[in-house]
Image (cartoon, grey):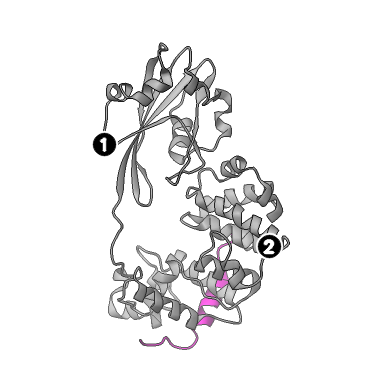
Amino acid sequence: MQRLPEGLKEKLCTWYDAGHRDLPWRQDREPYHVWLSEIMLQQTRVEAVKGYYARFLTELPTIAALADCPPDRLTKLWEGLGYYSRVRNLQKAAQVIMDEHGGAFPETYEAVRALPGVGDYTAAAVASMAFGLPYAVLDGNVFRVLARLFDVEVPVDTGAGRRIFVELAQSLLDTERPGTYNQALMDFGALLCTPAQPRCGECPLAGCCLALAAGTVALRPVKQGRTKVRERWFHYLHISCEGRTLLCRREGRDIWQGLYEFPLLETEGPADFPALAARSDFRELLGDAEWRLVGTVVMPRHQLSHQTIHATVYRIETPSLSAAAAALAVDTAAVGDYAVPRLLERYLLEYDG
C-alpha cells in the first residue's frame, strides 16, 4: 500500500490548531470529563450531546457522585440520548473505579480498556486525550478519512479491513501530540471529509489523497453489507384513573431496559383495537371496570439502528383499577419525573393533552 508523503501529521494538526470545534469537553484534560463525553458521543450527534454533558456534570460532578447516583435518577439524566446500556455501564465503571482504583481514574490503556462499557476506541480516546499516551482512535470519521487518503478497497466492516485500518491509524499517529492528532483526525472527518459532499476543494490533504486522484472518493469507505432491520408493532395503553397513570418499568434484555412506559401490547404485525381489547393481558389490566377509549394516536415511525418501531397509543379512561393495574399507578403529575423512551417522550410533549 502506498505511503502518504511526509508532513501529513503537521498539516493535520496545523489545520486543527487554526480552527477546531470549540466543544465543552475540550476545555480540560480531566479523565472523567473526557470519558463521559466519549461515552455520550457514541451513536449521538455532537450538538445533541452539549446540553446533556453540562447538565450531567452539574448534577454528578465527580466519579463518586456518579457511582452513588440512584439508577432511576441516572436514567432520567440520560433520557433522550438513547442506547441506555451506555449509562448503565458508565455507572458500573464508576463503581469499579471507586472500589478497585481508590476513586482515581486509571492511567493506563489496559486499565481503562478493562472498565465496563469501554471498548478499543474509547480506551484509546481517553488514554491519548487525558494522559497523552500513544494510542490511535478509530471511529466512523477516522475510517472514512483513512479509506479515502489511502483509497482502501477492503470493506471496513470485515476482520481484514479492521486490521488494515488499525495498522494505518497507529502508523500515522503523532506520538508527540496523540490527543491533539486524534481529535484533529476526527474533526477533519466531521467537517471536511464528510460522508456526502466532502469539501475536497478546501482540503489541506487534497494533494496526497489517493481516492481523490483516482476519482473514488464517493466510493470510500467500502462496507460489506447492512444488518437486516427488524420491524415491530407496539400498542401502548395510556390508562388514566382519577389523577393516576399506569407506568411500567422495562426489564429483561430488550431495548430501553430500565426505562418506563405505558402498559405495552406487542403484536407480530398491525392490529386493530378490538383485537387488542380481547387479549387476556388487556383484560387483566382493566378487569371488569367501565372504561372508555377517548383517543388514538398513531406515532410517526421510530427508527433505531436495527429496528423499526410502529407505535400506536390508545388513551383510555377508567373510574377504577384492577389490583394488577393499581400496582402500576403513579400520580399523573409525576409522570415527567420518570425516564421514558424517546418515542414516548415525543408523545408526551406533542400529543398528550
Question: Nearer the viewer's eye, disc 2 or disc 1?
Answer: 2
The part of the image, by quadrant, that contains residue 289 is top left
Amino acid type of the residue that numbered disc 2 sits on in the rendered structure? Glu
Q: List the residue tagged with mark 2.
A: 100
Q: Does residue 101 appear left or right of residue 36 in this picture? A: right
Quick check: 254 above or below 107?
A: above
Dots 2, 1 in contact, CB < 8 A: no
Residue at image location 44% in from the left, 67% down from the top: 141
Instruction: Give 221 or 106, whichever is nearer the viewer.
Output: 106
Q: Earlier in the sequence, mark 2 or mark 1?
A: 2
Residue range of the region highlighted in magenta in the rendering = 1-23
| Left or right placement of residue 195 versus residue 33 in this view | left
| Residue 51 on the magenta span | no
Q: Is residue 327 above or below residue 145?
A: above
Crowding at dot 2, Cα within 10 Å, few <14 / some 14-19 / many 20+, comes out as few
The answer to whether any part of residue 169 appears in the image is yes
Above-or-below relation of 277 to 45: above
In the picture as drawn, the residue positioned furthest to the right comes out as 102
Q: How far across and how far down the image is residue 216, in percent?
A: 29, 74
Point out residue 197 in the picture as x, y percentages from the top left corner: 35, 64
Determine if residue 62 is in view. no
Q: Position of residue 202 (x, y in %)?
A: 43, 72
- What amino acid is at disc 1? Gly
Residue 303 numbered mark, or none: none
Residue drawn where x is 73% and y is 62% of the image = 102
Residue at 54% across, 62% down = 118
x and y percentages locating residue 318 in the rendered image: 45, 14
Given residues 268 and 135, the one toward you in this image is 268
Q: Nearer the viewer, residue 157 or 45?
A: 157
- The Cα atoms of the two marked residues, 2 and 1, are separated by 48 Å
The residue singled out by tag 1 in the image is: 269
Element type at mark 1: loop
